Image (tube, rainbow, N blue to C red):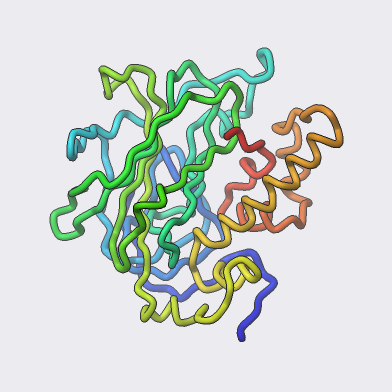
Amino acid sequence: METSSAQTFNPPNRGAPSSATDGGTRGGAFVAPQRGAPSSATDGGTRGNFEAPRRGAPNSATDGGTRDGFTPPRRGAPETANDGGSRLPESLSQLQLLVPQNGLSLTLSERPGFYAYVPVSDAKAIKFSLYRHDLATGQDTELVYEFEQAAPSESGIMSFALPQDYGLSEGQLYHWYVSLVFDAQDPAANIAMDAWMQRLDPQDPIAQRVQGIDPVTNPAAYAAAGLWYEPLQQYAQTRFVSQTNALRDQGKAEHWYHLVGTQCATSTEPWFTLLNSVELCEIAPAPFVN
């Protein structure tokens, strides 16, 4: 059985999408299997050396593409204050999805976890939306799941999970959004980020690289194969537990954003290593807020 201790990506080069909307995802050392997805994931966000699995995702995710009643709102995020007025660094004042640069991220999971960094703001709610996407038409064809909850009272990382009665279809391309809802009656007043993802067929060559390997015990093997959501989920769960224990022991939270310039560059914790490999390390110290 293959094992791996690395938390960074080194998948086969298979081509990448041309662009995925303004506002979003970021990347780094991950060189994903290029399979035809958008080559950059959103302006204001994607960074680094990540070359996404090219699998034919749309060239751009642009504002205003209304599908099944959903209007992806304008992108970007307002500058926000945290902890009674302390300014967050500019990069941490933006809504960001925890996905590599250039759009398409891969999974074998039927119900992967989705993660976003959400800055504190005047938003009334946070909305997660998942669509099936038709590559031939470039359209989001079916809203398969949508969930809305109160916006957090502090900046941090939020997770979104699919319900037990719905799972991703093998081989299907999906388009997902996280929106800051300022006005439920006016989607144009809201702010959204988006990303594409695909659940692989088990016979896919990338899936074959991790056949028989448990993502819980060896998530790094999945990262090395070019699968994003498995290592992200496992390291996020470990990080959440360690963060909870630290807060319990310390009795209070540190001003986590002060750690961005230090812990980010020096930590050997897999969560930091993984996010650093896709140039999302400034988010790594952030607390989980749901």
Q: Left or right: 84 with respect to 169?
A: right
- Against 93, residue 85 (above or below) is above
Towards the viewer: 16 or 210? 210
- Against 210, residue 152 (above or below) is above
Horizontal and vertical percent position of residue 5: 69, 72
Q: Left or right: 245 with respect to 134?
A: right
Residue in view at x 61 percent, y 66 percent: 216
Q: Quadrant of the C terminus?
A: top right
Residue in view at x 79 percent, y 42 percent: 245
Towards the viewer: 50 or 113? 113
- Against 233, residue 161 (above or below) is above
Residue farthest toward the top in the current orientation of the protein: 84
Q: Quadrant of residue 72?
A: top left
Horizontal and vertical percent position of residue 92: 58, 32
Q: Quadrant of residue 2?
A: bottom right
Residue in view at x 38 percent, y 23 percent: 181
